[in-house]
């Protein structure tokens, strides 16, 4: 049985989707969710779904080995960043090489990098009058949104679309593709 640990910072809709997808599967399960936000809605979702969840601060994550030690105990086969907003420390990546992936709400390399997340991305897509956007699932390296691309899915952006319309389209792509791609990676 493969073990998945999810990192999230916000509402946790992608985390919940992954937890539900892998619930009662015989090949993998989400064993833990970690968050840098003690008020994140993902904690409530985990409680309802009976999944272990912990919050941590920046010192525990990047200035000490506290989070690394939690991961060493959990022994994940895959670490999934699902709306996690902090840069992943190199010392953790070295212990889990090619085992950390992220989902990004744009077609990288466009609209990636520090500060490019959530509505910031969708507003930039609309402002720049893009005709398409999408999601990118990629490996995490020492730089924001620069790891090797695993999968991309596209959707049209209409001239009349608002950033909120784009966000809805991206959310549908995430819900449809993220669990399946994670499942393929684990196989």
Image (cartoon, helix red, strand yellow):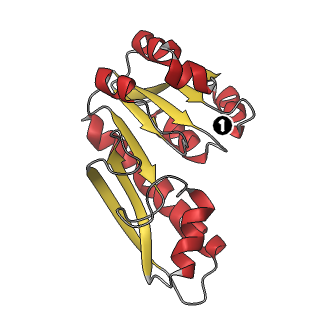
Q: Position of residue 34 (x, y in %)?
A: 56, 27
Q: Which residue extends farthest front? A: 63
Q: Is residue 26 visible?
A: no
Q: Is residue 142 above or below residue 121?
A: above
Q: Reply above or below: 79 against 84.
A: above
Residue 187 seen in this snapshot: yes
Q: Quadrant of residue 134?
A: bottom left
Q: Quadrant of the C terminus?
A: top left
Percent coordinates x, y for residue 15 in the rendering: 55, 40
In the picture of the structure, the residue carrying the numbered disc 1 is 42
Q: Secondary structure at mark 1?
A: helix
Residue at point 49%, 40% (across, down): 18
Q: Nearer the viewer, residue 24 or 59?
A: 59
Q: Is residue 135 above or below residue 39?
A: below
The percent coordinates of residue 175 (x first, y second) are 50, 54
Residue drawn at 67 percent across, 44 percent down: 11
Q: Is residue 152 left or right of residue 175?
A: left
Q: In the picture, which quadrant includes the N terminus?
A: top left
Rendered image quadrant of residue 154: bottom left
Q: Is residue 111 left or right of residue 26?
A: right
In the image as oriented, which residue stretches furthest toward the right? 39
Percent x, y of residue 177: 40, 55
In the image, is 127 to the left or to the right of 132?
right
């Amino acid at each position: 049985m493969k073990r998945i640990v999810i990192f999230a910072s916000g509402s946790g809709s992608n985390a919940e989707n992954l937890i539900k997808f892998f619930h009662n599967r015989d090949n993998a399960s989400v064993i833990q969710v970690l968050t840098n936000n003690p008020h994140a809605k993902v904690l409530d979702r985990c409680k309802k779904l009976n999944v272990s969840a912990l919050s941590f601060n920046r010192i525990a994550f990047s200035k000490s080995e506290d989070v690394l030690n939690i991961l060493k105990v959990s022994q994940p086969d895959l670490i999934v960043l699902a709306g996690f907003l902090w840069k992943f420390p190199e010392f953790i990546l070295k212990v889990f090489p090619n085992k950390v992936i992220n989902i990004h709400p744009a077609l990288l390399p466009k609209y990636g990098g520090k500060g490019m997340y959530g509505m910031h991305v969708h507003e930039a897509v609309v402002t720049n009058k893009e005709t398409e956007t999408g999601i990118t699932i990629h490996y995490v390296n020492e730089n924001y949104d620069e790891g090797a691309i695993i999968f991309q899915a596209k959707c049209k952006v209409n001239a009349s679309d608002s950033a909120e319309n784009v966000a809805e389209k991206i959310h549908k792509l995430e819900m449809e593709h993220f669990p399946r791609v994670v499942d393929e990676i684990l196989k």
